[in-house]
Image (tube, rainbow, N blue to C red):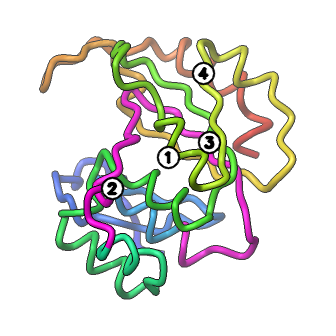
Amino acid sequence: MPLLSISNLQKNDNFLIDLGENIWLMDDHRWALLVWEMKRKHNRYTLVHADQHWDACYDFHENKEEEGKLLVADTARIHEYLIEDNFIRFDSFIAPAVRRGLFDVVHFFCTEDNENDIGLYDVFLKECGASQVIHPSVDSLAAVKFKNPVIFDLCLDLFNRSDMMMKGDLWSDSEIQNFLNSIKHIIG
């Protein structure tokens, strides 16, 4: 594994690196879909998505032909979708995974205050045979006993209270540590 120096990191939407022990670092987490499919060993997983944003868009819903291709895509084709940044983007990588049957339950812990767009749409979930749980607090998420193997997706913008682009109101180190301590049974 190459050494990773924080001081050398620069914005790169295609950045993806395996840090070992099933931990991946990426600049744009649409790449998570590729990693999930490359490492897939079980039929169904549970996703825990901790983020400032919901990232629950589904860009295939009006294109049934392309959706059919998604359902049978191998990892090479998924990689192409991600490079194209068209149907699978930074805010629309979870729903394609659900549609492909990777997740039967998605747990969201998101701080975005958008009452119109919370989580995945109920009709979509029903079509996919999946469900979701919206957690209003860390304690709610920490109390869950998971049945299936868990994939934990953490976007670091969770730790920023500001919803303004390029502005920061970061959580304190102790707030971040308390969050991580609360969910350590999830992240192993």
Image quadrant in which you'd find residue 60? bottom left
Residue 145 is situated, as x and y percent measured from the top left of the image, at: 86, 34
Spatial separation of the CA atoms under disc 1 and disc 3: 13 Å
Give left or right: position of 88 versus 93. left
Spatial separation of the CA atoms under disc 3 and disc 2: 19 Å
**Nearer the viewer's eye, disc 1 or disc 4?**
1
Give left or right: position of 69 versus 137. left
Label 2 crowd bin: few (<14), some (14–19), many (20+), radius 10 Å: few
**As shown in the figure, which amino acid type bears the numbered disc 1?**
Phe
Label 4 crowd bin: few (<14), some (14–19), many (20+), radius 10 Å: few
Cβ atoms at labels 1 and 2 below 8 Å apart: yes
Q: Residue at x 36, y 30 (%)?
A: 53
Residue 46 vertical position relative to residue 159 in the rendered view, above or below: below
Q: Earlier in the sequence, mark 4 or mark 3?
A: 3
Residue 161 vertical position relative to residue 101 in the rendered view, above or below: above
- By secondary structure, the bulk of the magenta-drawn segment is best described as loop
Spatial separation of the CA atoms under disc 1 and disc 2: 9 Å
Residue 106: numbered disc:
3
Q: Residue at x 70, y 24 (%)?
A: 141
SS at mark 4 in the image: helix
Image quadrant in which you'd find residue 91? top left
Of residue 33 and residue 119, the one placed in the foreground of this image is: 119
- Residue under pointer 1: 124
Q: Earlier in the sequence, mark 1 or mark 3?
A: 3
Label 3 crowd bin: few (<14), some (14–19), many (20+), radius 10 Å: many
**Nearer the viewer's eye, disc 2 or disc 4?**
2
**As shown in the figure, which amino acid type bears the numbered disc 4?**
Gln
- Residue under pointer 4: 177
**As shown in the figure, which amino acid type bears the numbered disc 2?**
His
Give left or right: position of 17 versus 174. left
Q: Which residues are magenta?
A: 36-64
